[in-house]
Amino acid sequence: MSDTQLVPDRYFELIDHDTERLLAMGERDLTAQVPCCPGWDVRDVLAHTAEVYEHKVRVMADNGWPSPWPPADFADRDPVDLLRQAKADLFEEFARHQPDEQTTTFSPDDTTITFWMRRMALEVAIHRYDAELAHGEMSPVPDDLALDGIDEMLRVMLEVDESEDVPTDHPVEAMVAVEAAGRRWLCDLRERSVTITTDSANPAAATVGGDPAVVFLWLWGRVGDERVERSGDSNVLNGFRGRLVECSQ
């Protein structure tokens, strides 16, 4: 368990708040375009988030990946109604399990229900930002969640063992530091692996830093380079950006 992880009640609070905010954006205008996601409008954001919620409900209920997926009727349903129902289903499913109960996840290091509490809180944080951006009414990502989101992106999404044989179009080999609120993640990028450490003072070829919320959004490609503090080798940073895009598809 990472020391950035939050307690279940905090994840529930954040999921509830951000889902309601996302619903409010959908009720305002589903056709507003999302600037950071070309081709997406707010309707797509709500429908996607609802589908992700319902998918995780099935994962936890069945302790396995649902197939086929998604259900055929999802595409025909109103996205506001679908997301509202998906939120209710998600909380009902969480209530059926203990946080440390074992379940199917995509992380070999965390196979508990808490993994999905964390993942869903971060999922909706990103997508309510997408919908807010479409309406020009962004609200901040809390620092505690943003730091947890930085940690998840780097240590769950990006980190990969050489034995997993995950291909990359960005075979940069260098150390990159990510810094926020006094914390430092050192990313050892290799052609066939990425290793993340949080207790290393070793030098980095490049560094990305800033306020936790901004760094979190930058890692997910929601804000531009001008919003973070970048230093060091620009080619390494470009390769790092490419690896982030690959791992978050």
Image (tube, grey):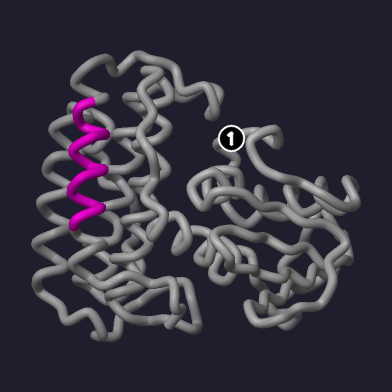
- Residue 186's place in the image compared with 1, above or below, is above
Looking at this view, name the residue that lies furthest to the front.
182
Local packing at callout 1 (Cα closer than 10 Å; few below 14, some 14-19, many 20+) is some
As helix, strand or loop, the secondary structure at mark 1 comes to: loop
Residue drawn where x is 80% and y is 71% of the image:
192
Nearer the observer, 202 or 18: 202
From which residue to which does the magenta span run? Answer: 13-24
Left or right, residue 204 beside residue 158: right
Left or right, residue 180 beside residue 70: right
Nearer the observer, 231 or 34: 231
Question: In the image, residue 128 lies at what x, y percent?
Answer: 34, 37
The kind of residue on which mark 1 rests is: Val
Q: Is residue 14 a member of the stretch shown in magenta?
A: yes
- Residue 130's place in the image compared with 185, above or below, is above
- Residue 103's place in the image compared with 166, above or below, is below
Q: Is residue 11 a member of the stretch shown in magenta?
A: no
- Residue that label 1 marks: 223
Residue drawn where x is 34% and y is 52% of the image:
69
Q: Quadrant of residue 175?
A: bottom right
Quarter that holds the N terminus: bottom left
Question: In the image, residue 189 lies at what x, y percent?
Answer: 80, 68
Left or right, residue 39 beside residue 175: left
Question: In the image, residue 134 lies at what x, y percent?
Answer: 41, 20
Count how many numbered circles sit on residues in the image. Answer: 1
Question: In the image, residue 56 lies at what x, y percent?
Answer: 29, 61
Residue drawn where x is 36% and y is 76% of the image:
104
Residue drawn where x is 30% and y is 45% of the image:
51
Left or right, residue 240 beside residue 63: right
Magenta stretch prevailing secondary structure = helix
- Residue 72's place in the image compared with 169, above or below, is above
